[in-house]
Amino acid sequence: MINDQIKLSGNLDIVVRDSSGNVKEERKEKNLVVTAGLGYIASRIKDASATAMTHMAVGSGTTAAAAGQTDLVSILGSREALDSTSVSGAVVTYVSSFEAGDGTGAITEAGIMNASSGGTMLCRTVFSAVNKAADDTMTITWTITLSAS
């Protein structure tokens, strides 16, 4: 009997630097691929013309990540265009930089979306506060791994 199961896992690497480029905080977090994100992945199997993931956002919401969510609870600033997206085997890596003044405050959630507003959210995570001052920069590297078991 063949028993294929696809498993998705996601990890974030968050790095906050001060205005001099010194690392203030580094964090590793896990995420949840939401129901809309799973539907998006399935649609990409059928229709390769579906809009690719293009933006990342951070926020101050503390509501636990749940499968039915379609956006962040409380976005800080606006969604940032991804700096890069790469695929290696069954791993997709998204990178976004939040420059000085962007996404400032106590950041407790993050998400990946396929539009600057509206659109589909692929995944969301909630974590203990990462404090980003107005003159800090922050880079988030988000890795989604697909595996069969």
Image (cartoon, rainbow, N blue to C red):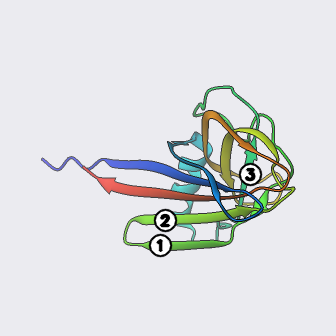
| In front: label 2 or label 3 | 3
Q: Position of residue 99 (x, y in %)?
A: 79, 62
Rendered image: mark on residue 79: none
Assess disc 2: are there few (<14), some (14-19) or many (≥20) residues with their C-alpha within 10 Å of its C-alpha.
Answer: some
In the depicted structure, whether residue 133 falls above or below residue 18: above
Looking at marks 2 and 3 on the same chain, the residue that comes earlier in the sequence is marked by: 3
- Distance of mark 2 from mark 3, alpha carbons? 17 Å
- N-term-proximal mark, 3 vs 1: 3
Q: Measured from the top left, where is residue 3 in percent x and y? A: 21, 46
Q: Residue at x 68, y 39 (%)?
A: 109
CA gap, disc 1 and disc 2: 5 Å
C-alpha gap between disc 3 and disc 1: 21 Å
| Mark 2, secondary structure of its residue | strand
Q: Secondary structure at mark 1?
A: strand
**Of residues 140 and 23, which is closer to you in this image?**
23
For label 1, count other residues whose C-alpha is less than 10 Å away and answer few (under 14), some (14-19) or many (20+): few
Q: Earlier in the sequence, mark 1 or mark 2?
A: 1
State left or right for residue 20 relative to residue 9. right
The answer to whether the residue labelled 3 contacts the one labelled 1, judged by CB atoms less than 8 Å apart, is no
Do callouts 2 and 3 mark residues in contact (Cβ within 8 Å)? no
Which residue is tagged 2? 92
* Residue at image mark 3: 57
x, y percent for residue 106: 76, 37
Q: Residue at x 69, y 27 (%)?
A: 62
Q: Name the mark on residue 87.
A: 1
Task: Name the residue type under label 1.
Answer: Val
Q: Is residue 53 visible?
A: no
